[in-house]
Image (cartoon, rainbow, N blue to C red):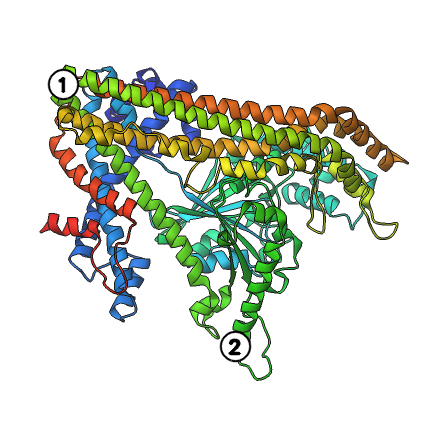
Amino acid sequence: MDDFVKTKLTEWGLSDWIKTFQDQGIKKESFYCLDNDDIDNLIKKVGPKAIFKKRLKLLKGEKNATNQEHEETADSAQVLANSNTRDKGKRKLELQEESSGWLSPTKKQQRDSTYAEKFMLSEVRNIMACVHNKVLHREKTKLNAFLEEKICDLETEKRELVGVFGRTGAGKSSLINAVIGEKDLLPSGSVSACTTVIIKVEANKQNQNYEAEIEFITKEELEKELWFLFTFILNDEDYKDEDDDDYNDAVEMLSALYGEEWKNKRSVEHLINDKHFREIPEFIVSKKKPLTCESAKELSAKLVKYTRSSKDRDAKEVKRWFWPLVKCVTIRVPNNDLLQNVTLVDLPGNGDRNTGRDKMWKGVVQSCSTVWIVTDINRAASEKEPWEILNSSLIGNGGQCQHIHFICTKSDQIGRHKGQSSVEAIRERNEEVKVEVKDHFREQQMATRHFSDECFKVFTVSAIEFQDKELLEPADTEIPELQKILQKLNDNHSETRNYWYVSGAYGILSLIQGARCGGGATVKTEVSKVLTETMKCGHEQVQKSMQEATDALEECLKRGVENSKSSCDDVLKSFLCPERKGKGSGFHKTLKCVIDNYGVHKTTAGKHLNLNEDLAAKLMDSIDEEFRKTFPTESNPGPFNGTISSFSLDTGKLIKNRKYKDVKLQLEFLRTEEEKIKIELQETIRQRKKEMYSGLTTTIKETMQTCYKDAQKCEGKGRLENSREIIRKHVDANKNTMFEKAKDEMMSKLKNLKEEILKKLNDTMKESIERALNSDEQSLPDVKKELETVTKYYQVLKKNTHEGTSPVSADQPGPSSAQVYLMQRNS
């Protein structure tokens, strides 16, 4: 082991693990390469492990900032000096556009402003890395520990998620390839996508390679899935039919993994033996598998056996298929400005039977701020599956989606109309489809309850024409419009993240310099008293508003319980005995699938059946309006009628009062802390509200478990009617308590959220006031110069963020405030 590793572990208070790292041959280079799985194996205790992960993340951020400093400084200098040299990828393309006169002055100013902000952020990161190092080597005091934690908390890696839904063959892969400018990344055409693999596409910020990271299901999850297949499908006479999709899917999955061997050895214990997975040791030890290539085409070829179906005719050379073991694949592409802060997620189907994949699927869907629903233009309004996704509670109150983009693909595939050119016919048909789809959207009761017309946009695209340019202009393909949407998402996220980092740094440096310079004890006591009283009043107002919202939701739930009790018989009748044509409908097999999968099944026609959700529907209906009012997806006015957003210590008034000039820096710190805690609380609320809303169905499902297990035991003649009777009796016996329990569970979660928010708000601000006004540390480093630099950057970014970035217009383009400051600084 080298001195670097010893020094770091000692600095971080983890010297007990020096021998472990030494035994594993960890040196400086490998130290930086450690991932979460490596750390879990090295450090078993939760506390030290958490500290190490946090410290390493910060250290990597410092290293990256140092490595990028020269590059980004050069970038900014080139921008400000109007140099002819540009970065690779998009920036190179922009230079060509600029020289040809195509790049507008507005776009040039926006681009240059972005590079100026990158430069400022890089400088602030370097400053905070140096300050952090100085604080680490000072005397260990409560204030120093507080400062270290605050500096570590500056870095965040949250990204905007755009979920892409659509049937196989709808053109998702071609769409994604065209939008991000990577023709060979995701296979399309005759290649059939595997229905279980989530594929994330984002930018590679570390190097120029095309990389992928494959996450597998666990061996325990595989064991459960094999048990289910053998117990309920492969050994059941009802499924042994060449036309049965569930049986065929099970055979395909097992044949992909084991060849013909599974047919002779049907023992689950034998099939999960490690010998079957020697080619992928990462699956055996529950680690992610990395892949690195120099081109998109090369990476795509390597990913085939992990992401594609074994029915794929275009990949006959593949001997072993591992897609049944894959939960998620994350692909990272270099030199892509659209994906710097945005992740495109190709989401298959309506969830999955495998619990691990299904949990991840639901979590990703709930986290999408934007959803793209992709369908063939010829079936845009008639196809059922896209509209089922649109009506899902996971993107409504159960998620955080703000924008729905309904994307009709293959818009160029149309014959020539009489008296019209093909281009005219395409444009006319596109407009007709847009009107038809928007009208159909307004007929969706569930969707319109959660999303307004402004949230719903329709696009008619042609990925092929965008790339080949044989018939349509780029604008007619509407791919550029989708690129603009991604760019705006990316830029907004970047601007917000940059502002919060610099704001946090400004507050921390203000606290350090303020504590170092001291200040009158009398003034500090007086200000502390004023702030404490203001906080108490604000805290009471938040508490009052949250209680009002809680009471309103409880009243809605009470009505929902009564409606659920009175309507559950009709729900069961509709679900268990649906109207159908002819005697041979095969519904007994469908119901068996529902029972075997504990209330959920996706039919061969693509219809998503969920008895648990149907039973919970009246509860959801009863609270939908009030729930959306209490937990809006929009930032204004924010949750609980905006009471958290309006919480304030009024530090601005105190800062302006000359009486308190000696504690101005401490007050500046408290102002930034107040902003930060409100953002953190709103993020906590956003996550918890998803759990609360989906929890209604979860509670119903838990209550229904017993009858599903009992119905699974039904065999022979009369099985269908016996299964129905078991479910009917169970619901009838539990309806007076089942819905009440779901209500109580939701109210309990809401109460816990309320208590957590109030406690976190009180404790965080109380500690911040204590550290700011009751700490004089002469031993702290002098950060006067650093504070001056960061203050200027903070003021620039605050102006951009609060007044709207891109303070330029097409008529009178001018430099942004960020550019103006940097030009002055460098002159």
Q: Is residue 42 above or below residue 374?
A: above
Residue at 41% in and 39% down:
637
Residues 726 and 641: in front is 641
**Would residue 808 be seen by someone viewing this image from the given angle?**
yes
Q: Nearer the viewer, residue 188 or 152?
A: 152
Determine crowd level at label 2: few under 14, some 14-19, many 20+ residues with C-alpha closer than 10 A. few
Q: Position of residue 520 (x, y in %)?
A: 13, 17
Q: Residues within 10 Å of mark 1 (few under 14, many from 20)?
A: few
Residue reaching furthest to the right? 717
Give coordinates of residue 14: x percent, y percent: 32, 18
Q: How many marks?
A: 2
Residue 424: mark: 2
Q: Is residue 662 left or right of residue 109?
A: left
Give residue 779's mark: 1
Image depth: mark 1 or mark 2 in front? 2
Residue displayed at 26% across by 65% down: 811
Residue 133 visible: no
Residue 813 spot, x, y in % from top left: 23, 61
The quarter of the image holding the N terminus is top left
Give the alpha-carbon distance from disc 1 to disc 2, as whole Å: 75 Å
Going by the numbered disc 2, the residue's amino acid type is Glu
Image point 56% across, 56% down: which residue?
A: 374
